[in-house]
Every structure is written in structure tokens, then in C-alpha cells.
Amino acid sequence: MTTANPPGAPTFELSGGRLCLDFVNTVSGMRDVAARERLRGYSDLLAFARVAGAVDEPLARRLLAEARRRPDDADATFRDAIALREALYRIFLARANGGEPDGGDVELLSASLAAALAHRRLARRDGGFALGWDDTTSALDAPLWPIVESAAALLTSGDLPRVRVCGLFESGECSWLFIDNTRAGTRRWCSMKDCGNVAKARRHHARSKETGDG
Ligand SMILES: [Zn+2]
């Protein structure tokens, strides 16, 4: 699913099925081989958070202004965000492959969770209450709080065995992660539109060659 993206910002695809996986998927292609980085700085991180619903428009505007006032802090937050993203990638890739995540990565997520939860707030919603986040904040790491919570929730949920890596991981072409929501657990591609079509065309080509009509 591609959603409306702010002008000038990179395009983000939200096909992971969870906020934390969409964040992991802000690198296209294959990590360590032919990665295409979609986040080049703090404002890109903010653009992703806005598109993915991790921050609302007023908070995004406030944080962008704050980042312009404190560029060095924004850079540091951005570097932390990328380190967190790569830790999340390794954690969920390990699970997708049936392995154990690295202890240091889990520790980083756990520490990030503790920091994020300090900003949990009760919010009035529809005549009742809901869990929300401190929306008066100008903390530059605010976009990461819902992402961290999403990752901790997924890691501790019954959906964890449904985390998959794209079928083109084996051939070193795509390292996107997603939740397989099909009943039979048969989803193989991060996106049918991209990798699914590539694989289909390739199978077709291989068959044509076998039968000698291609
Ligand atoms: Zn893919």
C-alpha cells in the first residue's frame, strides 16, 4: 500500500503490516548488497513517521521547527533512529528465519521501550479514555516512541511466528519484512506489485525456456 507522501520526501510503502516493520522497510533493495536508503536525515524520519501515522501533523510541524533550531541534536536523534531500525531488522529477521535475536539488539529495544513509556499518557477519546502519547512534547525522539512500542508489542505477541522476510531475500534482492496475514501462511512477497511480479516474470521466463518457446 502506497500512501500520500509529502512533496519532496522519499516515497514510503506501508506493506509490513506493523508500524515497526514499515520502519524497518525504509531501506529498499538488499541490505549490505544493494541497499537503497530512503531516510537521509531527520526530516525524512519525520516524513516517514507522519505517513505511517506515528506522529500527527501539528506534532510533525513542531518537531521540524525544533530540529531546525537544534540541528546537531536532530542529527544525533537520526543516528540513534537508524541504529534502532537496524537492531529491529536483525531481531525480526532472526525470528523470521527461526533463530534467536542478538541479546544486545534486544537490550537496545528494551532500553528504548523504557524511555518511550515515560511519555505514555491517558487521552480522552470518544467520551472515554485511550492510551496516547505526550502530544505537548518537543522531544526530537517522539517519532520513535510508537515505533518502539509497536516492536515490543510484536515481539511479545502471538503474531511473531507470522513475521516473514521477502521471498527475494534468498537471491539477495530484497530484505523487507512483513506479517503474513493469510490464513494458510502462504504470503511470500513483501509486495505483490514489486517483488511478487519480479518473481512471477522470472518463473514465466524459466518455463518458456524449458518449453523452448521463449
Ligand atoms: Zn521484496
Image: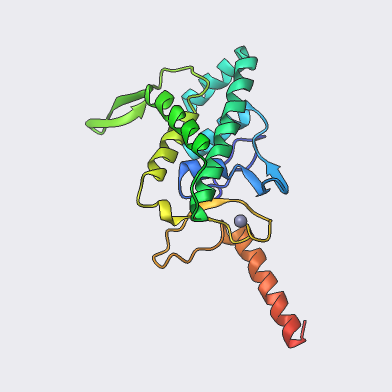
Q: Nearer the viewer, residue 100 or 173?
A: 100
Q: Which of 36 and 107 is in front in this view?
A: 107
On the question of residue 22 being in view, the answer is: no
Which residue occupies 76% across, 86% down? 213
Which residue occupies 68% across, 56% down? 173
Q: Ligand 1 is found in which quarter of the picture?
A: bottom right
Above or below: residue 173 compared with residue 152? below
Whole-percent x and y of residue 203?
66, 74
Q: Looking at the figure, which quarter contains the C terminus?
A: bottom right
Whole-percent x and y of residue 89?
55, 43
Whole-percent x and y of residue 127?
22, 31
Whole-percent x and y of residue 126?
25, 34
Above or below: residue 73 compared with residue 108? above
Extreme-top residue of the structure: 69
Residue 39 quadrant: top right
Which residue occupies 50% across, 52% down? 99
